[in-house]
Image (tube, rainbow, N blue to C red):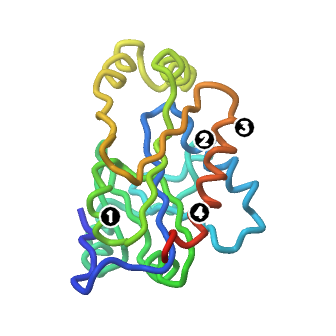
Amino acid sequence: MSGGGDPRGPIEGGAFVAVVGPSGAGKDSVMAYARQRLVAEPRVHFVRRVITRPSDPSLEDHDTMSASAFPQAEAAGAFALSWSSHGLSYGIPAAVDELVRGGGVAVANLSRAALPALRRRYARVVVAEITAAPAVLARRLAQRGRETADEIAARLARSVAADAAAGDRHLIDNSGALAVAGDRFVALLRAAIAPPAGG
């Protein structure tokens, strides 16, 4: 995993909003909702991740890179942050550093495992944890039709415990209407635009 941060200190200026949560919580839906409502806000940028997975209209809009090219790009400094999960490699483009340094708010779906490196790299990190009730998660995963009932149960059982001790974490329950969770996320992004108190 890359993204250890600059030895001169974390990047200041703006903020990085990391969206985390279990499969089926509706992270992409909540982010799409916020993107539509903040389309006129130039300081908020929804980052296109680089993934070693072919493009698929049913999945997130991302840039695709081959598994062989990814480590070469990683070594060349193409990513501000990178990690691996479920056999795929993910990268946040290096241009995000300048975006945050210039006062912008970068928003991206991240793995919880990448949060320590993210916090080392940027001075202001906000973690939006999108959650839903277990029954809701199970139903949404079943509707996708990608896993059997046993595989879904195993996935839910493997859910990683939340980083509850982190002061930058904000829990958003997306068990009900999308607008409820979406509006909470929009409010969180608007708050991230403003400089911290005393800053």
Residue designated by label 1: 119
Lower sequence index among marks 4 and 3: 4
What residue sits right under mark 4 in the picture? 46
- Tell me the residue that label 3 is attached to: 179
* Horizontal arrangement in the rendering, residue 110 relative to residue 175 (left or right): left
Q: Position of residue 12 (x, y in %)?
A: 42, 79
Q: Spatial distance from mark 1 to mark 3, Cα to Cα? A: 29 Å
- Residue kind at label 2, given as amino acid type: Ser
For marks 1 and 3 on the same chain, the one whose residue lies earlier in the sequence = 1
Residue 99 place in picture, x, y as percent = 52, 79
Q: How far apart, in angstroms, are the residues tagged by discs 3 and 2?
A: 21 Å
- Measured as percent of width and height from the top left, residue 36 is found at 75, 54
Amino acid on which disc 1 is placed: Arg
Disc 2: which residue: 58
Classify residue 52 by image quadrant. bottom left
On screen, residue 4 above or below 84:
below
Identified at 39% across, 20% down, the residue is: 152
Q: CA distance from mark 2 to mark 1?
A: 31 Å
In whole angstroms, how far apart are the C-alphas of marks 4 and 3?
19 Å
Q: Secondary structure at mark 1?
A: helix
Front of the two marks 4 and 3: 3
Q: Residues within 10 Å of mark 2 (few under 14, many from 20)?
A: few
